[in-house]
Image (spheres, rainbow, N blue to C red):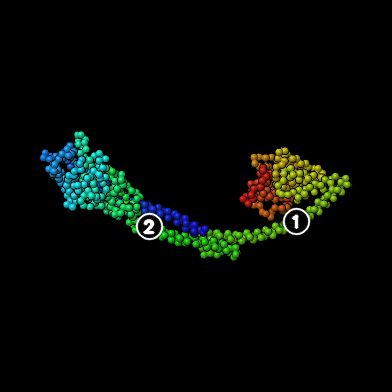
Amino acid sequence: MKLRTKMFLIYSIVAIIPILSIGYYSYSRWQTSISDQISTYSSTVIHNAVQQSNNTLDSINRTLDFMTYYSDDSQSSIVEILAEFANNPDNFSSYDILQAAKRTNSIFGNLMYANSNIRGIYLITLNSLILGTSNDQTSHINPNHDCRGDSWYQQTLSLKGRHFISTITSDDLFTDENPSIYLSRSIYDVYSHKFLGVILLDMNPDILNLDSLTAIPDLTLLYIENSKTGETLYSNVDSLKTNGTQYTDGMQKFELNLEPLELSVSFHYNTLYAQYNPAKMVILLLILVFTAGVLISLYLITGKITFPLERLSRVMQHQRKNGLKFISPYMGRRDEIGTLYNEYSHMLDEINEGIRRDYQNRLIVLDAQMKALEARINSHFLFNTLESINSMAELADNKDIATMSLALGDMFRYAIKTPGEIVTLSDELKHVDDYVSIQLIRFNGKFRLEKRIPVFLQNTPVLKLILQPLVENALFHGLNYCTTGDLIVISVEQEDQLLLLSVSDNGVGMNPETLSSLQSSLREQNAFSEIGQRTGQSIGLRNIHARIQLYYGKKYGLSIESIQNSGTRITITIPAAGSPINTIQNG
């Protein structure tokens, strides 16, 4: 993924998260406000519908109670009238019926005028005699109809004084065919609880009408039903079976004050919310437009920032084809981009210089490999010659020549044939012994070598060819060819994680100026060309010091102590484990 794309994505995320959070918060608050408005509307409709329905039913109940027990000094109550017919069911005349009808009409007529939805009020005696009146000139009860076989009558009796309310119906009980709702109740004697008859209210179905409560009738369902029979007494939907399915979700039911009537209320919330869709789309469009504007701005800004980096990247990709050449107008800038371009240019210059040096070094390595191959070929001739000299010396019984030729052969094998640069301390000491055995013959035993090495350090790994050059240096420069002093001592000890190898002599020593010059020489930066060189002191101390530092690190190497006319001590310090340290990290 390109840097510009990454930056664009990161900046977009950082910028869009607050935008979307604010947009989501605003949209949520708007949604909550709309939900609150719809909830308030629905709660108000429900409260008003329940209250109006209960008020209507309570008014009817009060009317029935009042008519049942109302009386004054000149007239009997409904209970008393029914009691007269109940006590003498077969002993009354037409005059008695006429007088009873006048009394009931007087009582019912005043009450019906108070409620225009009550069409008529009737009493049904035990022998199915019907008394009552109607305020509708077109609707009268059929006086010859025997109500005792009607379903509504039987259900009224079964309720034992509780109210029965019918569904919207039209039957032959009345002379017209207008739909009606019956409300009836059995009447009992107050004292004897004897059944006296039934009072019946013929009501207009509009008595339960709730159409005026809904500001949005197409989206609000209100209907009143009998919870036991499932019959509907009122619905503001013309065809409940056809249109009612859209209101089934979230239907709420409320018991009314007249059992078993229930008020059911439901709202078509999806349509209600849909009315606010235009405002919702405006809010969402504003959020999208603002987000798109921010993204376009970020894209242009990130392009301006990353263009110099993209150009540098393209230049770097084509360097392999065009060579390490670089020129750019951005190198004159003083910001981080200019620094990057200038540093890249400097790096190319250094790489070019490194390539040149590497090419030269490869030539040197190839030359060294050729010389090493020549030395390896010549060594076979040298070893074979020394073996011949040794054999001839033994045949001539010349032990000195035999010893020297054998020791010299072992020394050459150790120096040339030993694989790797790390050997054990015992192998390095064996090489020193071969060298000393030759020099003892040469100088006729005028010096001696002492070794002070703990047994547990014999197998400690050390760098090859570091002790013998120091012994050689002590013999020729310290003992001055055995003219001053006669003792060389090799001692080895371990201190924590360091291995200390010392070569000391009791020779001429060095004056302070010479010692200081030699110590300064060891502190100078090592050069690759110095490794393998020989100086006036045989294999130079700087050679050994350079090899140790290149292999183990700069904190290791040689240290020199010397007192004039008393001797010299050279100490090698290397890691006790003998493992090399990364020479690149340590310089």
Question: What is the spatial separation of the Cα atoms under label 2 and label 1, in whole angstroms?
Answer: 83 Å
Residue at which label 2 appears: 284
The one of 45 and 300 positioned closer to us in this rendering: 45
Q: Position of residue 424 (x, y in %)?
A: 72, 44
- Of all residues, the one furthest to the top in this rendering is 192
Q: Residues within 10 Å of mark 2 (few under 14, many from 20)?
A: some
The one of 351 and 519 positioned closer to us in this rendering: 351
Q: Secondary structure at mark 2?
A: helix
Q: Position of residue 366 (x, y in %)?
A: 71, 58
Q: Secondary structure at mark 1?
A: helix
Left or right: where 19 falls relative to 144: right
Which amino acid type is shown beneath numbered disc 1?
A: Leu
Q: Residues within 10 Å of mark 1 (few under 14, many from 20)?
A: few
Camera-nearest label, 2 or 1: 2
Which amino acid type is shown beneath numbered disc 2?
A: Leu
- Regarding residue 170, the answer to whether it shows in the image is yes
Left or right: where 218 falls relative to 501: left
Do the numbered discs 2 and 1 sit on residues whose CB atoms are within 8 Å? no
Q: Position of residue 122 (x, y in %)?
A: 19, 45
Left or right: where 557 falls relative to 258: right
Quarter-of-image position of residue 566: top right
Residue at which label 1 appears: 373
Residue at the image position 58 percent from the left and 61 percent from the top: 348
